[in-house]
Image: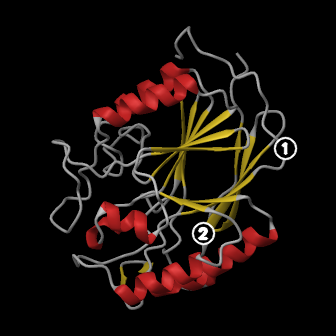
Amino acid sequence: MRRENRRVATAILEPGMRIGLITDIHYHRQIRYGNRHCPDSLAKLKAALLVFRDQKVSLIANLGDSIDCHGCDTADADSLADLQCVLATAPCPIVSVMGNHDLEGLDKRQFRQAFGMTERYPGEQIFKDCRLLLLDANFSASGQDTCGTNWDWRESFLLPSTLAWLARQLAESRQSLNLVLVHQNLHDRHAAGREDPHVICNAEAARQVMEDSGCQIIVLQGHNHAGGRQDLNGIVYLTLRAMCEGPGLANNAFAILDTESDGSAALIGFGRQTDETIRFPTC
């Protein structure tokens, strides 16, 4: 149950606010493994950006694992350059969070530089009547950056300082909608009756912070390529499907988050991405 101190947002969302969503591009010029067709992701990304241009999105959120080094501790420079050239054609600004594969071949400073993120994480941006909170869960239990190839991808933590920052940001928020962007997952690790290794190890602490805030929050995340949704104590957790899965444009996956003037939101899926309708409690 939500806490009794739940604060209800009084402002309404501006109609027509549109955010393009992409995740798990896993681009590399040559690598294919499992069902990940990494070279095909460049054409898929180009197609998504064309749709975003046509649909007049105002911002694009990239939820991580943009590149794939496949166990190499240095990013392939040509593949990264390919990706940067395509992203540069985007019709609007892009905000990106770091995935575990991004940090196999790049450190965090290099990632921010490569993807045009000038601020450190966690970071906050205000867009119309929406607050975007960008998190970094690429830390070990001891607080060490999990960059390079010597880390188990299942080891991901949010720093205590990040949790404190998140609590402050939500306490100060006067926006109708707060979007929490993170690569790894924040939903219930055991909701499916088994342990989900995609979930951040201390996700429960982050969920408590969000629930205590009383804010209207959608968590946008990637990492689990199958995608999915959980609604927990008034917070909506949307996991976007991976762009890299499956060959060719027929297996593309991306979305647009469309907000409505009544405070609801809709996820419009393209390719393999499903649609979702989001309505928050009114009390």
Cα–Cα span, label 1 and label 2: 25 Å
Q: Residue furthest top?
A: 4
Residue at 68% x, 18% y: name it. Answer: 8
**Between 19 and 77, the one nearer to me in the picture:** 77
Figure check: 56 above or below 84: above
Q: Residue at x 24, y 62 (%)?
A: 147
- Left or right relative to 209: residue 56: right
| Image position of 60 with respect to 119: above or below | below
Horizontal side, residue 17 vs residue 274: left or right = right
Nearer to us in this view, 85 or 30? 85
Q: In the rendered image, is residue 104 in sight?
A: yes
User: Residue 271's x, y, as percent?
Assistant: 66, 71
The residue shown at (44%, 79%) is 27
Residue 250 image offset from top left, x and y in percent: 63, 81
Check disc 2 and give the amino acid type: Ala
Check disc 1 and give the amino acid type: Pro
Residue 151 is drawn in which quadrant? bottom left
Total number of numbered labels? 2
Q: Please name the residue shown 48% across and 74% down the image.
A: 245
Give 228 or 170, whichever is nearer the viewer. Answer: 170
Secondary structure beneath label 1: loop
Instruction: Please identify the quarter of the rendering in which residue 189 is found.
Output: top left
Q: Position of residue 56 (x, y in %)?
A: 80, 64
Image quadrant of residue 270? bottom right
Instruction: Residue 15: give its label.
Output: 1
Q: Is residue 144 left or right of residue 280?
A: left
